[in-house]
Amino acid sequence: TTGWYDKLPEVKKMVEKSKIGFLYAANFSLGVNIFYHGVSIISELCDKFHFYDVAISETHHTQKLDAPSATALALAQTVMQKFKSKKTILQETPRMKIKPEQLQITSTRLGSVVGNHCVVFDSEADCIELVHSAKNRTGFAHGALIAAQWLKGKKGVYTMKDVITSMHNG
């Protein structure tokens, strides 16, 4: 679900006017949305210790049109909300030293890879790698069905983060 976010304010107005429920996500996979949740927690913890750095990498099939993926960009936003030293996203391959406030995303297009995302927190002492790998597209369908069931009877605009948070909080 890429390429329409510039229209989100207009969509929100339509949803409010129509008094319906609307749920959107960069990625409907349950695994990816649980991954976002974990990345958020670890970003917050690593930010408290100023000796960690963080970067994101993603790999998709060669037919994918966008780079970085909407999922990688959503991961970057998740990281930057909690890892306060990162202020901007660096999407291209750097030709010089990157600035400490830049969060680098590297994108690879390879064969028929459905989708792999990795967030790395690195320090001189250790490295923490969080990885999500989609094996097929079933996870997207399951997530969309669960989101639709969760949305039933609700009014307003929601994201998959709302679904995961409500499930996490019981």
Image (cartoon, grey):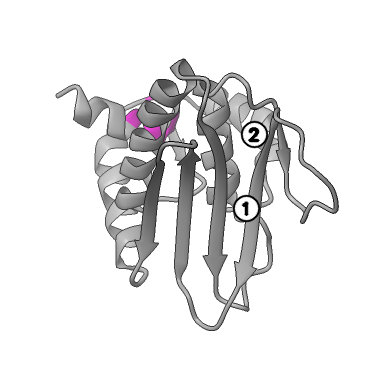
- Quarter occupied by residue 85: top right
The type of residue carrying mark 1 is: Thr
Q: Kindly give the residue lying farthest to the right in the view shown.
A: 95
Q: Dividing the picture into quarters, in which one does residue 169 lie?
A: top left
Q: Kindly tell me whether residue 53 is visible in this rendering.
A: yes
Residue 127 percent location from the top left of the image:
42, 43
Residue density around tag 1, few if under 14, some if 14–19, many if 20 or more, within 10 Å? few
Tell me the magenta residue range: 155-162
Res. 119 mark? none
Q: Nearer the viewer, residue 21 or 27?
A: 27
Residue receiving disc 1: 2
Q: Are marks 2 and 1 in contact (CB under 8 Å)?
A: no
Q: Quadrant of the C terminus?
A: top left
Is residue 157 within the magenta segment? yes
> Which residue: 37% across, 65% down?
134
Q: Which residue is mark 2?
A: 8
Numbered disc total: 2
Q: CA distance from mark 2 to mark 1?
A: 12 Å
Image height of 142 relative to 82, above or below: below
Q: Residue at x 40, y 48 (%)?
A: 129
Q: Is residue 149 left or right of residue 90?
A: left
Give the residue furthest to the left.
Answer: 170
Q: Is residue 114 left or right of residue 16?
A: left
Q: Quick check: is 161 in the magenta stretch?
A: yes
Q: Amino acid at mark 2?
A: Leu
